[in-house]
Amino acid sequence: MNMVEVAINQPCCSGCQACVEMAPEIFAFDAQSGVAVVITSPCLEETAHKAAAYCPDDCIDIIE
Ligand code: SF4
């Protein structure tokens, strides 16, 4: 299974938490800053792509 690095473009993040619901093993919500943060990187490529597709603001960057 391929692993990829993921990063969140935080200024673009609305804090909707869709990525946290989709992949809680990779993303968490930081209540203090009001945006999502990456807690596991590298992570599984398939899950990372699913979460990136789920983000309504297209803020999840995948570094292959
Ligand atoms: S899905 Fe996108 S906009 Fe929503 S919390 Fe995650 S990174 Fe932010």
Image (tube, rainbow, N blue to C red):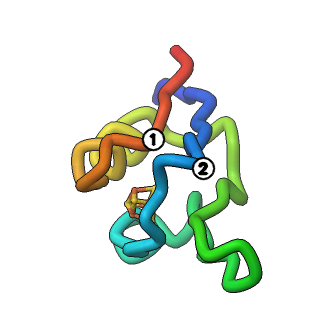
What residue sits 56% from the left and 29% below the top? 3
Secondary element at image label 2: helix
Q: Secondary structure at mark 1?
A: strand
Count numbered badges in the picture.
2
* Residue where numbered disc 1 is placed: 60
| Residue at horizontal 66 percent and vertical 54 percent from the top | 38
Q: Residue at x 57, y 48 (%)?
A: 11
Q: Mark 2 or mark 1, which is nearer to you?
A: 2
- Gap between marks 2 and 1, in whole Å? 9 Å
Q: Are marks 2 and 1 in contact (CB under 8 Å)?
A: no
- Mark 2 residue crowding within 10 angstroms, few (<14) / some (14–19) / many (20+): some
At 71% from the left edge and 59% from the top edge, which residue is drawn? Answer: 39
Q: Quadrant of ligand 1?
A: bottom left
Q: Which amino acid type corresponds to the residue marked 2 in the rendered image?
A: Gln
Circle 1 Cα neighbour tier, 10 Å, few/some/many (<14 / 14–19 / ≥20): many
Residue lying at the far top in this picture: please name it: 64
Q: Quadrant of residue 43?
A: top right
Residue 9 % position (x, y)? 56, 41
* Residue at the farthest front position: 11
Q: Residue furthest bottom?
A: 31
- The residue at which mark 2 appears reads as 10
Residue nearest the viewer, comparing 11 with 8:
11
Dot 1 amino acid type: Ile
Query: Is the CB of mark 1 within 8 Å of ligand 1?
Result: yes
Horizontal and vertical percent position of residue 45: 44, 33
